[in-house]
Image (spheres, rainbow, N blue to C red):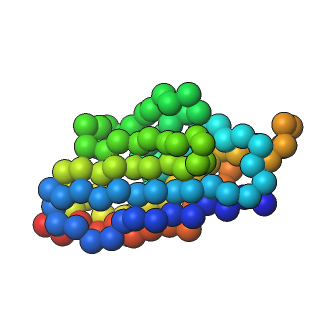
Amino acid sequence: QVQLVESGGGYMQAGGSLRLSCAASGSIFSINAMGWYRQAPGKQRELVATITSGGSTNYIDSVKGRFTISRDNAKNTVYQQMNSLKPEDTAVYYCNADVKTRPTMRGFYWGQGNQVTVSS
């Protein structure tokens, strides 16, 4: 069993910054890619950023230059630094991890979700 526990988020005025953290624990053999998704009210969940175990990153265009994803492999933790926040960044943010619990057993796990609200 694998658990992803998120922290951070909250309320911020436009232009401000917030940082999200997501720590994985449990029966972890290795973690491949980790990522952040978000879901705004009335919209589908969308992928925001991903990071591989080697540190390669990808972002959706709307957050490039403002959000930074990083990870600490020793702590099985992924972070997302969010700067220059905009009201359209308001959403519930979920972390995701591609985890091997055994060399031949793999699954995708989700955090509990964390509300980020940006006021104009």
- At horizontal 43% and vertical 33% (from top left) the residue drawn is 58
Q: Is residue 41 above or below residue 1?
A: below
Q: Is residue 97 above or below residue 12?
A: above
Q: Going by the picture, which residue comes out furthest to the front?
A: 74
Residue 83 coordinates in the image, percent (x, y)? 24, 50
- At horizontal 35% and vertical 56% (from top left) the residue drawn is 19
Answer yes or no: is residue 83 visible: yes
**Which of 116/19 is in front?**
19
Give the quarter of the figure containing the C terminus.
bottom left
Question: Could you say which quadrant of the image residue 87 lies in?
Answer: bottom left
Drawn side of residue 28 relative to residue 8, left or right: right
Answer yes or no: is residue 110 visible: no
- At horizontal 50% and vertical 37% (from top left) the residue drawn is 51
Q: Is residue 103 above or below residue 9?
A: above
Drawn side of residue 50 relative to residue 100, left or right: left
**Which of 94/30 is in front?**
30
Residue 33 coordinates in the image, percent (x, y)? 59, 38
- At horizontal 44% and vertical 41% (from top left) the residue drawn is 70
**Which of 28/39 is in front?**
28
**Which of 29/61 is in front?**
29
Give the quarter of the figure containing the N terminus.
bottom right
Residue 48 coordinates in the image, percent (x, y)? 42, 46
Number of numbered callouts drawn:
0
Drawn side of residue 99 relative to residue 69, left or right: right
Residue 105 coordinates in the image, percent (x, y)? 84, 43
